[in-house]
Image: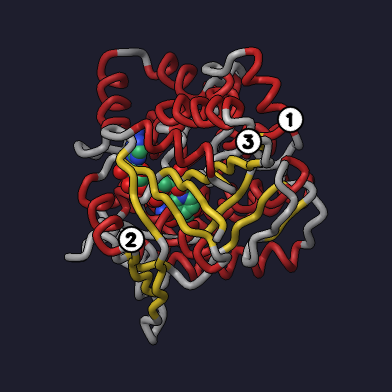
Amino acid sequence: MKKAVHFGAGNIGRGFIGEILSQNGFTIDFIDVNEAIIDALNDRGSYTIELANEGHDKIEISGVAGINNAKNPEAVVSAIAETDVVTTAIGPNILPFISGLIAQGIQKRREANNTAPLDVIACENMIGGSDFLLEKVKEDLSAEDLAFQAEHIGFPNAAVDRIVPGQSHEDPLYVVVEPFHEWVIDESGLKNTSFKLEGVHYASNLDPFIERKLFSVNSGHATVAYNSAYKGYKTILEGLQDDEIVTALKNVQAETRALLLAKWDFTEEDLLAYHNTIIDRFANPQIIDEVSRVARTPIRKLGYDERFIRPIRELKANGKGYGAHLDVVGKIFSYKDVEDPQAVELQERLANERLVDVIKEVTGLKDADLIAEIEAVAKKYI
Ligand SMILES: NC(=O)C1=CN([C@@H]2O[C@H](COP(=O)(O)OP(=O)(O)OC[C@H]3O[C@@H](n4cnc5c(N)ncnc54)[C@H](O)[C@@H]3O)[C@@H](O)[C@H]2O)C=CC1
Ligand SMILES: O=P(O)(O)OC[C@H]1O[C@](O)(CO)[C@@H](O)[C@@H]1O
């Protein structure tokens, strides 16, 4: 059997990546710091995925084990030294904390003269996730390791799409997921071409796929979340009962379509169908998705290449409207959640610094007109 090492045994790790790897005949070592999840994986070697459809269909995943990277980093390095693929779904902010282990795994492969090609695939909601991870990994590689990596270890970028809400079951491994899923890998970045994963689409150019996904699913979901938070709703489903919020979502989608049509070879008809399907996915009555999950890490979501600022920059550069996106950005600055460290940090900064300085720093923008527009809209909401 082929072996996989997957960082992050959380919702998307167990609920999507685990499913695809297992169905392709891989055993999986899940790497995580959550003791309860790691123990349960090792005790049982299997877990259950439930599809959020009317039949509540179940999928049994077996051949899984867990390693706690905080307690047993050597075991993680050994697993990487022998594995056939490495994947992550751990959160963009956490990648720098696990990159050192991947570097050590690469070093161990070199020392063992294991020249089998290996791909490390970051499955995070970000553009260039594997490129970013590679840059972090390189910080811990010697000149010899760097040469080895360049020849044998690929870091292809990827886009993953499946809504997996927060889970609260007695069984810490049980995970309820929406039926829809899409995983696209940039095949130009692959080193190991000896297999292709069934259920994964391999694209020669990932850019249109990741932009379509991030600016549709993630910008759209975040639009519902921040508008819902602003109006005091607790779940995405509650927010979607409010016509103003549905209109805000549709307006963001319309701007997104204008941008995607200007940049890529999609048709308006296909994009409209894609966007309508997304609205239905958000409104799946079988899924209870907390606003706090979809709105989490607001400072990250205000980033230069993230789901709002990047489309706004590109819409502006293309002479197209971006008012709907801008309105959500204004509401992000009003977002409060005492359980979310980034939401707390943002509010503390707004209380102690000039709004314009906070905007400049979190968005990375230099365009004075755009910064002024964001300041004006943020002032309406904070
Ligand atoms: N949940 C979803 O619907 C989707 C999530 N994603 C992306 O997948 C990534 C993970 O998201 P979720 O699975 O929802 O989050 P999650 O919070 O359920 O899972 C993250 C896991 O990483 C673990 N972790 C945190 N710090 C760690 C560390 N230093 N070392 C090892 N493990 C650590 C946590 O214990 C947790 O089990 C994010 O980048 C997200 O944007 C992508 C598509 C869909
Ligand atoms: O905030 P993050 O980490 O990107 O994760 C939340 C996102 O994940 C998803 O559930 C799937 O991409 C989105 O619907 C949501 O926007």
Residue pictured at 60% horizontal, 36% vertical: 130
Can the viewer see residue 380?
A: no
Residue under pointer 1:
151
Q: Position of residue 317 (x, y in %)?
A: 73, 31
Residue farthest to the bottom, as pictured: 55
Q: Earlier in the sequence, mark 2 or mark 3?
A: 3
- What is the CA distance from the residue labelled 3 to the residue labelled 1? 12 Å
Q: Is residue 218 left or right of residue 113?
A: left
Element under disc 2:
loop
Q: Earlier in the sequence, mark 3 or mark 1?
A: 3
Front: mark 3 or 1: 3
Mark 2, ligand 2, within 8 Å: the answer is: yes
The circle on residue 80 is none
Quadrant (top left/top right/bottom left/bottom right) for the N terminus: bottom right
Type of residue at label 2?
Answer: Asp
Residue 89, x across and y down, in percent:
46, 46
Front disc: 2 or 1: 1
Q: Residues within 10 Å of mark 1 (few under 14, many from 20)?
A: few
Callout 1 amino acid:
Glu
Is 208 in front, or is 304?
A: 208
Residue 148 x/y as whole percent: 68, 25
Residue 114 is marked as 3
The answer to whether residue 15 is above or below residue 189 is: below
- Return the residue nearer the eye: 382 or 335: 335
Q: Which residue is tagged 2?
A: 289
Instruction: Please tell me which residue is depicted at 46% across the width and 32% down the height of the picture.
Output: 95
Residue 331 position by quadrant: top left
Callout 3: SS: loop
Query: Between tags 2 and 3, which lies in front?
Result: 3
